[in-house]
Amino acid sequence: MSAEKCLAKGSAAPGPVPEDYIRVYSMRFCPFAQRTRLVLKAKGIKYETINVHLKEKPDWYLKKNPLGLVPTLETPAGEVIYESPITCEYLDEVYPEKKLLPSSPFAKAQQKMMLEHFSKVIPYFYKIPMDKKKGEDVSGLEAELKEKFAKLNEDLVNKKTKFFGGDSITMIDYMIWPWFERVEAYQVKQFLDGTPELKKWTELMLQDSAVKALIFSPDAHKAFFKTFLDGNPDFDYGL
């Protein structure tokens, strides 16, 4: 139950969300929306996907989410929830089977603090290839990103766990994963060298059933990201 091709300005608004389902408004290559889709998959929630054209947003979409971003969730009751960490926490609370967030308030706070730290890493994934394309010197940015990867590696070493929240996948792993799925497209894969625990984490994540169900090949990510860098993103690439 999904509209694979993205809906753009002038498209008709989708009808009500079917009973027993939740709807996610997404874009196939968006790492933020992938967070929410990973949580939906991991928890076995019945959902449908509507992809949105992020350059030519439909008016009906802006009424649901005035920020015009993805992901957005919509329930059969017409309730709308947006922003990736908020949608993921909402799903974990409303669908209590297979909890992804820890029950301890302190452990939960730790994951949120880690997510806050990671939010400062995300801009590097875009700034490095964008500045490189403009012919600018990115060696300083690359050194900083290398340091951030080393810090993530150190976290795993200190915790002595396979994943960031313990020995099984939890919410924080799904929050971080989408950017590591795209390291080749962002031209930063080489900075994983020298971070053995972080590298091991990426290999373990690739074995996860939710990750496997939603993954795109490095070539598909590279092809889409090239259109993004060229200023004309092909949201329907590969369809």
Image (cartoon, rainbow, N blue to C red):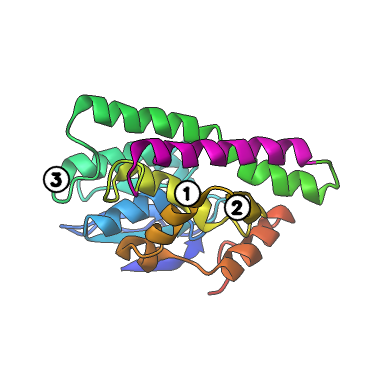
Residue 15 horizontal side relative to residue 96, left or right: right
Local crowd size for mark 1, using a 10 Å CA cut-off: few (<14), some (14–19), many (≥20): many
Q: Residue at x 40, y 44 (%)?
A: 175
Dot 3 or dot 2, earlier in sequence: 3
Q: Are marks 3 and 2 in contact (CB under 8 Å)?
A: no
Disc number for residue 121: none
The residue that mark 3 highlights is 96
Mark 3 packing: few (<14 Cα in 10 Å), some, or many (20+)? few
Mark 2: amino acid = Asp
Q: What element carries label 1?
A: helix
Q: Per the image, is 153 magenta?
A: yes
Q: Nearer the viewer, residue 111 or 2?
A: 111
Q: Position of residue 112 (x, y in %)?
A: 35, 30
Residue type at mark 3?
Answer: Pro
How far apart are the alpha carbons under marks 1 and 3? 29 Å
Q: Work out whether 218 lies above or below 89.
A: below
Q: Which residue is drawn at 60% across and 70% down?
A: 219
Q: 110 or 182, which is in the foreground?
A: 110
- Residue 39 percent location from the top left of the image: 30, 51
Q: Earlier in the sequence, mark 2 or mark 1?
A: 2
Q: How crowded is mark 2: few (under 14 residues within 10 Å), some or many (20 or more)?
A: few
Q: Can residue 63 be seen in this view?
A: yes
**Which numbered marker is on residue 193?**
2
Q: Residue at x 73, y 47 (%)?
A: 130
Query: Residue lying furthest bottom in this view?
Result: 239
Residue 231 in sight from this viewpoint: no
| Residue type beneath disc 1 | Leu
**Tag 3, which secondary structure?**
loop
Report the magenta residues as a range: 138-162
Q: Name the residue under label 1.
A: 198
